Structures are given as structure tokens and as C-alpha cells.
Image: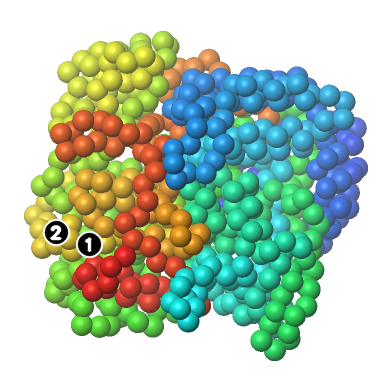
Amino acid sequence: MKIIQVYSNLNVYLILFVTLLVIVLPPSTGAISCSKASSALKKNKSIKYNDLKECLESFPLDAKLATETVDAVLHFLSSYYVFFDRAKENPPSGFTYQRVDLKNELDSLRKKFKSNYSDYDFSTDLRNIIFKLKDGHTSITNLCYQGFSYDQGLSLYSVVTTDKEKKKKQSSLISIIIFGLGIAKGVFEDTVDSSNNNCEVIEIGGKPALQTIKDFANNTIQYSKDLSVRFNMALAPSQQYFLRQFFQQFTLREDLPETSSIKYKLTCPKKGSFTLERKWKITYKDGYDVFSYNCLQQNNETTSSDKITKLTSRDKITKSTLSNKFKTSKSKVSKIAHAKVINEGSLYLLNDKSKSGVVVISGEQSKDEDDLKYSFQELKKNGTKKIILDLSNNPGGEITVALFLTSLLFSSKQPNSFPTDIIINNFTIPKIENFFKTKSTEDDYYNPNVFLSFPFGSHFNSSSDFIGTRKKRTSNLYLNVLTSDEKKLLKNVSFPWTSDDIIIITNGFCASACALISLFLSEIHNVRTIAVGGLLDDQMSFSTYPGGEIASPNEVASSAGDKITDVPGKNALSFTVREAYGFDKNNTVKDVLEYSYKPADCRLYYDEKNAKDPSLLWHEASKILHNEVKC
């Protein structure tokens, strides 16, 4: 029988055709308990919370499969996850997260297998263990349980106000406005009842609104080790490109909420004070057919021995990119009233006398490198004196694009990227030696021929040079190689700007390859940085999870020649496979970037105007760049 499976996230669709060997069994308990949820989905209606909860908790635990899943997860994380040991350490000052002993946590999980422990309980507990790492590259997703969308129909934002004594105050309120993000004041937009727009939220669930959002960001969001960045992600972004999967996570979730509804105490200009109780609108992202297959049919089928890797677009892993994994939705466009549009969404000139230009970079994809070069050439033609790089809401992308951008702006400087390394296992050493012996140019984690040694970009002289002498790690460290097309684009490029002419502004969510760009420009070229939003009076990171590179188990297993090829069952694992390091002016390798707190040089906060119009933030950045104001 041929099963056609459609996966979607933010309007990205992936169709997989898989041949399955089917054994027909009697209807499962899960199928019966899910009848009400199934009926709602067939009618394209929202599922009632209690109906879905009954459905998800009805699947019995297969203790043997759960044991095999834990074994496989532990194997891949202990063998390839570069932060496996470092995660056990206390966080550096500035970061807020728990230390995690993955082996102990996973071993403790086995002790929970009992008669009243459901498959959903197991999947949730496993997922929460991985989430404690606060590593955006590393997660586990169940194809059934994380396929649902839980939407409050509200978008919250937050602001910092200045009182009569010119003291900044972070409101304990969260408001509802039309499109924008901030630090703690309100409702961004209510898609159910527009009369709630611009109302302020005083309490959520009987607690002060600000504290509720802060607690949620601290305990639930995984994508940054910096609480202020996670706080921003709990709310809605103030940029024109809307990454719904990352932001407004308090009101738009993919894990079953603890309660069927949330009560908001609001105060509104026209309606006064009142309590709003909002139930979750619950849908399956890809519709009934995919729900039936992912959640029901798999309990009635035995697949062939070949593992079928079914990844949502959120979890589809490519070797050096997050850009294919997370897509940007242009569902709404912010007002850009204080800048001239050169290229919508990417290039602007401020409408003042500063001669400042703005380059908005929303992702790192090789197909966009021509546009990047064009943007800076256009700014040069326009006589732009200063450049603002807006890297907010950037989920990352291809590593070589990070090299390309730094080389584009600072072509004479070497090295042009941070050094990295990977874990070396006994069974990977023969592969490394064979790659070197055969002079293969295959793109592979363990091929020394496709990397350059740090710091001068030299080719490795031998396989042992690549392997090095450090226990379990490569020793000489290595750099990615620019492609021939990228090298051609960089030929005969010359720009007039120095480090003093450029400033970076982000809301903290400049992730993966974007983090490597912003950190490299900041650390190596002394480009100043601005972080926007977060918690008042706390320093804040301008980037997040620069780890190095993301991978899936089957990809690494294939590359390493591992006998264990994937995690069994419906759980899709991803993890950081390469570790990136900072270095000093003498090219001496120092800190691990993922575990180094790098706060921005300057800080701006959202208010009710710049939350809706980012060009106001650009003007503030320009004043800092021109040294008109101190940060």
C-alpha cells in the first residue's frame, strides 16, 4: 500500500511516498479514544481540549520500544552531541538554565515505565529532558504529539515606559496591539475579538502578567540560554517577517497546554476592566489524513525493517542549515514610515541627514548571496556613510553564507570564521583515513579534504593532522571552505566602510549561522551591537545558539558508519554535531561560543511606537552609530 504523507509548517510542504508492509489489527484503544478528535478534524473544526487530552493519553506505552528509544537517544547524544559533557556544568554568569546530566536523566526516565505510564507521558518527559539544554539545535519531536497547533488567537507584546522622573519602568502589563513585539505591556492583536486590540493585560491566570510570561519563558522555551531572549520569544516579533513557530510561544503552542483555557484580566480604553477567558483553538497542522496516519494508523501497522524518517518541516535537518528547517512567513508587514524602501524587506535608507542605510538579513541561504552583494553595492552607490545590520528574527542557514558575508565586508582579514571541531569515535577514524587516502571531495563530516585548518586556512597534511591528539575531539580545528561560486562573487569587491561604520541590531533571536555572523563581526572586527527588548535592566545577548552545526541521527550514522542508524518509533531527534570556538588576536582558541555569555554593547527597549515600526529603532541605532547618544 502506498501512503502519501504531506508535511507542512508555515506554508512549506514536503511530500513523501513510502511503501509500507501492513498487518491489519483490531482497532486500538487509541483509535477509539480519539474518535471525537477525529470527528472534529474531519469536519475541519477545532478539537475540544478534553477530547484531545483523552486521545493523547490513551496510547499505551510499549516498554520495549520506549527502552530502545532511550537507548538510541543516549547513544547518539553521547557519541556525537558535542555538548554532552559540558551540559553537566553550571551555567556561566548571565545565562539562565539548569545543568543537565543527560545520561542520568535518561536512565531515570526508564524507571518511570509502569502500568499507568502512557506513551504520551514518555514522549513528553523525553522531550522535556532535551529541552532543558536550552540548545535550539537540539530537540526531539514526536510526529503525532507535536503535530497539533494550540492557538489563543492573541498576540502579546511588552514595552518599557519612562516616568516623569525619566526613570525607565517595565510595565507589569501585557497589551494587545496590531503587529509588534516588545518587553511587557500588552495584546498585540486579537484575531477573535478586535475590540480587545490595544487593551492591557494586568493578570494572566490570576498572576501578574509580566511574571507569568517570565516564568513561561524560563521554564518552557528551549531556544536560548538567555532568559531575556526567551522572554522576547514568548511574545510577538516587531519585525515585518513573522516567524510564528519561534515567537508568541505563550499564545501559540505545539505541546498540549496544562489547562483548557487561560483567563486574562484586561483593562481597555473603551471597555474598562474585565476578565477574558480564552479557550485554545486546536487543530492538526496538516489535516485529518496526516493525523490519522501519524497518530492512529501507526498503531495498527507494522512497517518494513527500514526506518521511515518522517520529519515535519520544523525538524527536517540538512547538513549545514536551519534555513530549510524554519521558514519565514510574510503574513503581515510592519509599518516602515521613517525609511525609504530600496528593496522591500531587505534594504532601506533612513529618511534623515545621517546617510545611514539598513540591511535586513532574515536568513542565510546561498541563493541570497547575490542579493547581499547587491545590497551593499547599492548602499555604496547612494553614498551611504553608516550601515545598520538588522539581524532580528533570523533563524540561521548555511554556514558558508556566514563566511561569505564576513569576507564581503572585510575581505582582507583572515581567518574569516570561527574554528570548529567534532567528536571522534574509534569507528570514524578509518573513515577519515580512507577519505584522505583516496583524496575524496565528498561532502562529509569526517572528510579532512573538504575543510581547512585553523587559523590560516591551510589544507590538512594528513589524516592524523585532522584527527589530532585531543581525546574524542579533532585537534587542529577546522574551517568551512567557500564554494567556487561564492569566491567568484567576492572577486573585485571593495567597500569603503570600516568596523566603526557598522552596527548590528537584533532582538536576540539571531540564531545558528546568524549567531556566527554577529559574533564574528563583534568579537573579531569590533562591530558594535544593540539588543532590543528582553527584561528591564538585565544585560541581553544579541545572538543565540551559535553551536556550530545541526544534524539528524540517520545523517550522522550514515557519515560515521554507525551500526545504529536512527531513533526508533515516531520520535525525530536533532542535535549539535559541531562546536564553535572564539579566538583572540593571536589566533589562540579560547571559549566555546555556545556556553559564552556575550551581551550586546548597547540596549534599546520597545515602546508602543517602535514595536509597530522598526524604522524607529533603526533611527535610534543610527544615533548610537554616529555617537550622538551613548548606550
Image location of residue 322, percent across then percent down: 44, 46
Q: Secondary structure at mark 2?
A: loop
Q: Is residue 30 left or right of residue 491?
A: right
In this orientation, which residue lies closer to the viewer: 350 or 483?
350
In this orientation, which residue lies closer to the viewer: 48 or 41?
48
Q: Is residue 516 left or right of residue 30?
A: left
Q: Quadrant of the N terminus?
A: top right
Name the mark on residue 498. Answer: 2
Q: Give amino acid for label 1.
A: Ile
Residue beneath disc 1: 502
For residue 500, what is the image quadrant? Answer: bottom left
For residue 385, what is the image quadrant? Answer: bottom left
Q: Is residue 515 left or right of residue 15?
A: left
Could you classify mark 2 by the number of other residues whose Cα lies within 10 Å: few (under 14), some (14-19), or many (20 or more)? some
Q: Is residue 101 left or right of residue 484?
A: right
Q: Is residue 288 above or below residue 427?
A: below
Q: Is residue 64 above or below residue 94?
A: above
Q: Give amino acid for label 2.
A: Thr
Image location of residue 535, percent across then percent down: 50, 59
Q: Are marks 1 and 2 in contact (CB under 8 Å)?
A: yes
**Residue under the point 77% across and 45% down:** 292
Marks 1/2: CA distance? 7 Å
In this orientation, which residue lies closer to the viewer: 308 or 349?
349
Q: Secondary structure at mark 1?
A: strand
In this orientation, which residue lies closer to the viewer: 590 or 405?
590
**Residue under the point 53% across and 68% down:** 170
What colour scheme governs how the chains and residues are painted in the rendered image of this protein?
A: rainbow
Residue found at the far front of this picture? 165
**Residue under the point 38% across and 83% down:** 337
Q: Quadrant of the C terminus?
A: bottom left
Could you classify mark 1 by the number of other residues whose Cα lies within 10 Å: few (under 14), some (14-19), or many (20 or more)? many
